[in-house]
Image: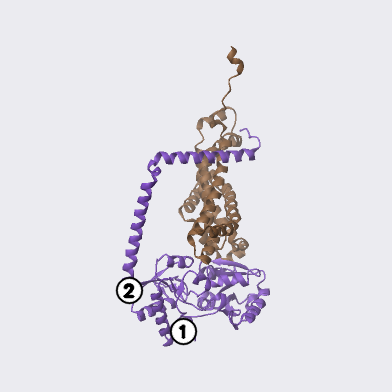
Chain colours: A purple, B brown
């Protein structure tokens, strides 16, 4: 059919190099032909500068205007029940939504709550798509490098959700609570005690969360860790039996356990960890430069925690009190 | 732009390249066989073969790959007892095989149309000439129709291969940590979307550059009849005539 070329490998390489070269040459000559004005650097630079200044000018004007109106745009995830989720009517609901509305009332501000995917929630805040994140976000050192946080409005430990029939259901440390910052040794001992049981198992976590970081740091060698986009996705895979356990915030797991598919055959186990890598509680994410907004939120949170509103809302959504203490 | 950071990002994302290429080429290999089968079914002129193939192509070309991946992974995950009974759960339990299955089904639908186009564009006079030489059936297909069809289909099939390499990025939604999955993870840890995605884009660009060159080389190798013949040097003696 065809004559095979001699030494095919060398031949292909030569062909790749020569065609790449000729391609480059062609591209270069085309550019000169089509855009002769590019050669005139001076004019181009002036145009670029003018355009740049105009853009900056517009941005400043827009920024100034939005600061004057007192509308605060707040983002939540909408897929982290019972913290925040999209209800039957397509409306955002949950603990975070109630907290956001409560704080806005106290601040006498007009608020607009929007849904935003979790893995882009911080970049979009810094890009000024909205002004605050109220999405069950834990305050961590890693996140503090990029954004600022209000005072915590909640704090809850993590845990494992497993099938009752699984060997993991007898996990040591169940019912005990540890703080990774203040009880480091005891907490690490409890983690070591869990490890042998996890050998060869797979754990689902939501990517970009403190739980993913926690699993990476403490359980990486012991078990296979799979990262999901949402908590709903790892719950589905737990129900399907693709993974043996879900590691998440115990409040979220309590929410999962309320669903009919999970209430009968699944159980919350393992040592309840908080602090350290897991953060100092759940706060509102804000841009670093918005110090006034932070002060307003801090005052409102303090007032809402003190008069028991946060406790009331927490019991409404989680059945337990996770309002920050002390 | 922070180049030290981009270098770090490059080193972390490059770890996802083997999985990206593995997903792409496994599904292209299975998909090509399946596509050939579908193309032959469509050209068989037998209604019971033609219609299912047409319906298949319609469904898999007409729905987004992301939806197909979700349906195969999370959708079938809900029918575990049935799949267990059929002995298929071992396959559907693994996100890798679910991703390969979705990508294969998808590329088979597109590929079958490309192959059908290639086969139908084989000039009729060539087939007639072959028949006149006494070829028919499989011999005719193997010697004349298939080699010509492959040459005609290759440029379009090359694009399909590139599309598949890029389509593997969707496997990250079912926990596969390929280049895009690792990029998303890195962004969530560093919150520096621009640098990480630029690096991820460059990695895909390099992979696809190499693939396009390989396809171009194969095209060149398959079409000696289109190349300019080497210039014949006039013999020196000719000057004395």
The quadrant of the picture occupied by the N terminus of chain A is top right
Q: Name the residue under label 2.
A: A70
Q: Give the SS element for disc 2.
A: loop
- Earlier in the chain: of badge 1 and badge 2, it is 2
The image quarter in which residue B225 lies: top right
Residue B45 visible? The answer is no
Q: Name the residue under label 1.
A: A315
Instruction: In the displayed orientation, state which residue is furthest to the front.
Output: A42
Q: In this view, does A285 lie to the left or right of B19?
A: left
Q: Which of A53 and A99 is in front in this view?
A: A53
Residue B53 spot, x, y in % from top left = 51, 48
Q: Is residue B194 left or right of residue B220?
A: left
Q: Which of A58 and A89 is in front in this view?
A: A58
Residue at screen point 50% across, 80% down: A155
Residue A260 visible? The answer is yes
Q: Give the SS element for disc 1.
A: helix
Nearer to us: label 1 or label 2: 2
The image quarter in which residue A310 lies: bottom left
Residue A311 spot, x, y in % from top left = 45, 85
Q: Residues within 10 Å of mark 2 (few under 14, many from 20)?
A: few
């Amino acid at each position: 059919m065809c004559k095979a070329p001699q030494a095919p490998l060398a031949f292909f390489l030569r062909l790749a190099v020569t065609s790449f070269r000729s391609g480059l040459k062609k591209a270069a000559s085309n550019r000169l032909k089509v855009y002769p004005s590019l050669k005139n650097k001076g004019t181009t630079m002036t145009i670029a500068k003018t355009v740049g200044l105009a853009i900056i000018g517009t941005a400043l004007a827009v920024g100034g205007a939005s600061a004057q109106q007192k509308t605060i745009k707040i983002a939540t995830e909408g897929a982290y029940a019972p913290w925040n989720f999209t209800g039957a009517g397509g409306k955002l609901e949950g603990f975070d939504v109630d907290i956001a509305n409560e704080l806005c009332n106290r601040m006498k501000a007009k608020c607009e709550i929007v849904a935003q995917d979790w893995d882009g929630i911080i970049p979009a805040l810094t890009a000024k798509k909205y002004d605050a994140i109220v999405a069950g976000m834990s305050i961590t050192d890693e996140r503090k490098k990029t954004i600022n946080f209000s005072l915590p409005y909640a704090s809850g430990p993590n845990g494992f959700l497993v099938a009752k029939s699984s060997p993991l259901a007898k996990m040591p440390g169940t019912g005990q609570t540890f703080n990774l910052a203040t009880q480091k040794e005891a907490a690490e001992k409890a983690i070591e005690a869990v490890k042998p049981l996890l050998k060869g198992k797979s754990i689902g976590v939501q990517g970009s969360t403190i739980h993913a970081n926690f699993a990476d740091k403490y359980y990486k060698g012991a078990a296979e860790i799979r990262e999901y986009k949402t908590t709903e996705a790892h719950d589905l895979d737990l129900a399907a039996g693709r993974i043996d356990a879900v590691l998440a915030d115990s409040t979220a797991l309590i929410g999962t356990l309320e669903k009919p598919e999970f209430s009968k055959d699944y159980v919350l186990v393992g040592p309840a960890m908080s602090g350290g890598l897991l953060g100092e509680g759940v706060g509102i994410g804000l841009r670093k430069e918005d110090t006034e907004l932070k002060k307003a939120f801090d005052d409102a949170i303090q007032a809402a925690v003190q008069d028991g509103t946060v406790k009331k809302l927490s019991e409404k959504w989680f059945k337990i009190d996770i309002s920050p203490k002390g | 732009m922070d180049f030290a950071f981009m270098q770090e990002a490059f080193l972390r994302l490059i770890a996802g390249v083997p999985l990206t290429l593995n997903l792409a080429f496994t599904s292209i290999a299975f998909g090509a066989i399946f596509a050939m089968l579908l193309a032959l079914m469509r050209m068989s002129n037998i209604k019971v073969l033609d219609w299912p193939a047409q319906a298949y192509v319609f469904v898999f070309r007409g729905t987004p790959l992301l939806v197909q991946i979700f349906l195969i992974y999370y959708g079938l995950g809900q029918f575990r007892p049935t799949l267990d009974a059929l002995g298929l759960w071992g396959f559907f339990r693994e996100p890798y095989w679910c991703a390969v299955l979705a990508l294969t089904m998808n590329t088979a639908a597109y590929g079958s149309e490309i192959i059908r186009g290639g086969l139908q564009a084989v000039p009729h006079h060539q087939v007639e000439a072959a028949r006149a030489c006494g070829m028919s059936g499989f011999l005719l297909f193997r010697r004349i129709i298939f080699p010509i069809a492959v040459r005609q289909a290759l440029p379009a099939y090359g694009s399909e291969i590139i599309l598949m390499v890029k389509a593997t990025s969707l496997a990250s939604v079912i926990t596969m940590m390929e280049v895009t999955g690792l990029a998303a993870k890195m962004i969530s840890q560093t919150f520096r979307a621009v640098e990480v995605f630029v690096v991820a884009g460059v990695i895909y660009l390099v992979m696809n550059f190499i693939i396009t060159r390989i396809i171009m080389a194969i095209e060149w190798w398959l079409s000696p009849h289109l190349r300019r013949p080497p210039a014949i040097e006039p013999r020196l003696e000719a000057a004395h005539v």
